[in-house]
Image (tube, rainbow, N blue to C red):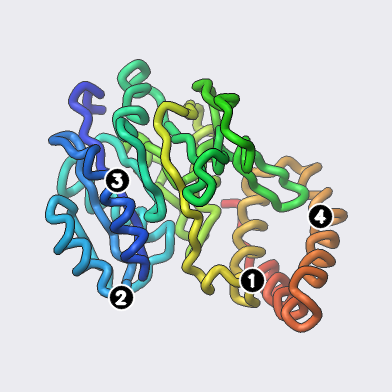
Amino acid sequence: MREVDEARVAVLILTLDQWESTTRTLESLAQERGPEVDVVVWDNGSTDGTAAVVRERFPWVVVHRSQRNLGVAGGRNAAARFARQQFGSTHFLFLDNDMVVTPGFVEGLLAPFREDPGLGQTQAKLRFIAEPDVLNDGGGFRVTWWLARTEPLGFREPDRGQRDQVKPCLPCGGATMVRADLFFELGGFDEVFNPFGPEDLDFSLRMKQAGHRALYIPQAMAYHAVTSTFEGGRYTENYARHKARNWLTLMRRHAPLHQRVAFYLLGAPYLMMRMLFRQGPRQGISALRGWFAGSLKSGSPN
């Protein structure tokens, strides 16, 4: 592993048909530029001209356009391999394309690695763009296995400084820095979770199980728009199928036995009733079909 004093960070931004939010993120990153920071936009098969817009407006950004959508895990893995080959990156900063970062963001996430080169991962503090005084993430994942629920610590709390302490965390994937050597050692994000999540939670759990620490770094802060491209953010049958398959795969890998039992006995029936109530009879039944289909296709814990 290269000494952290010689660190080279690759900021990896995945995008798909969202040139406006992507360019807003890049505008905020302009202040983070330096010889030790490379910015890569991995265009996951956009048809709205995202790659051309970024190349024209941000000549300091390296843009790679995939011919097809590789999914979130696949696109991030491909971007990481690309950056490693192009720049010899020592650290990867995975950044959602709907973020606006504040000054010192990259260095804030990198600094803890200088103090502890064995550190595995750091995560930023996030507020909402639309509600700039409200927390989106103040400390990483909190998982309630039996309800199939993941929620960031401090979610929707007014930010009064109550989440401003550095502490161990289970990082989310929207604004997180990882040692490149460790990322590849653990096999990157598992593409079984394509086309979308929770590949980031699975990676963080695998990293923790391998004995590596992660830290929440509130000094590195960004504002998050929280957008979605898959199915336009709608709870369709296809969305429900993928969500069920991926959640059950994650739970079989990582959840304690009693939490899995509680999910099947209590959580799943509750979620199905809520789905019917919130979506209405027609859409709810369609979503339930997707949920059952995804349950049958959920992966093994290997």
Q: Position of residue 266 (x, y in %)?
A: 86, 54
Tell me, yes or no, if residue 205 can be seen here.
Answer: no
Q: Amino acid at mark 1?
A: Tyr
Q: CA distance from mark 4 to mark 3?
A: 41 Å
**Circles 1 and 2 in contact, beta carbons < 8 Å:** no
Q: Position of residue 44 (x, y in %)?
A: 33, 66
Q: Residue at x 36, y 66 (%)?
A: 18
Q: Residue at x 17, y 34 (%)?
A: 36
- 168 or 100, which lies in front? 100
Q: Amino acid at mark 4?
A: Gly
On the image, which quarter does residue 118 sit in? top left
The label nearer to you, 2 versus 4, is 2
Q: Amino acid at mark 2?
A: Asp
On the image, which quarter does residue 275 sit in? bottom right
Earlier along the polypeptide chain: callout 4 or callout 3? 3
Residue beneath label 1, please? 235
Q: Secondary structure at mark 1?
A: loop
Earlier along the polypeptide chain: callout 2 or callout 4? 2
The label nearer to you, 1 versus 3, is 3
- 21 or 5, which lies in front? 21
Residue beneath label 4, please? 267
The label nearer to you, 4 versus 1, is 1
Residue beneath label 2, please? 48
Earlier along the polypeptide chain: callout 2 or callout 3? 3
Earlier along the polypeptide chain: callout 4 or callout 1? 1
Q: Position of residue 300 (x, y in %)?
A: 61, 57
Residue beneath label 3, please? 28
